[in-house]
Image: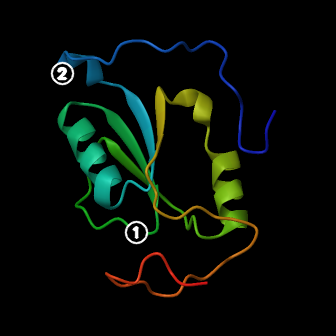
Amino acid sequence: MSSMGILRTDWTLGPVAIDPSAYIGLKVAIFGGTGGLGRAISEALLAQGAMVTVLGRSLKEAPHRQRTFVRADFSSLVESRDTARQLAAETFDAVLLTHGIFAGPIRKSLRRVSRGTWPPAH
């Protein structure tokens, strides 16, 4: 078993459901579902009847009876690992990683790059 969870062996790749009723009751966890692409996917799935667990720093949307929010800061490697370990991944039909921050053991800073200065001079 990896440090990030359990590898599912009972799942196989299949066609994407086109019938909107196929999403009713679907259980989905969305890492980074509070903004950008993750938020759009979350809202679309909720509108189709899915049960959505959103993981992120903060949730600004109004409460929804089919949405659960788990506060998590993915810029922290320790918190990312702890959140993943506490999440019962085997209870979800799908887990989506849409967060824009990936924790790493070493933080690196990039200087600000503006149009016309890429690639940076070495």
Image position, residue 22 (x, y; %): 26, 17
Circle 1: residue type: Ser
Image position, residue 24 (x, y; %): 27, 23
- Report whether 19 appears left or right of 72: left
**Along the line of sight, which residue is nearer the eye, 107 or 41?**
107
Q: Which residue is mark 1?
A: 58
Cα distance, mark 1 to mark 2? 28 Å
Q: Which residue: 59% across, 70% down?
A: 75
Q: Which residue is mark 2?
A: 20
As drawn, the label of residue 75 is: none
- Report whether 93 appears left or right of 102: left
Q: Secondary structure at mark 1?
A: loop
Image position, residue 69 (x, y; %): 42, 55
**Along the line of sight, which residue is nearer the eye, 102 or 43?**
102
Q: Compared to 57, does 15 lie above or below? A: above
For the C terminus, the image quarter is bottom right
- Report whether 35 appears left or right of 13: left
In the image as oriented, which residue stretches furthest toward the front?
Answer: 121
Q: Which residue: 21% across, 40% down?
A: 44
For the N terminus, the image quarter is top right
What's the image's color scheme?
Answer: rainbow
**Along the line of sight, which residue is nearer the eye, 45 or 122?**
122
Image position, residue 112 (x, y; %): 45, 87
Circle 2: residue type: Pro
Q: Which residue: 60% across, 83% down?
A: 109
Q: Secondary structure at mark 2?
A: helix
Q: Compared to 89, does 109 lie above or below? A: below
Tell me the crowding category of disc 1: few under 14, some 14 to 19, or many 20 or more residues within 10 angstroms, Cα based.
some
Q: Compared to 4, does 113 lie above or below? A: below
In the image as oriented, which residue stretches furthest toward the right?
Answer: 1
Q: Between disc 1 and disc 2, whose residue precedes? A: 2
How many numbered callouts? 2
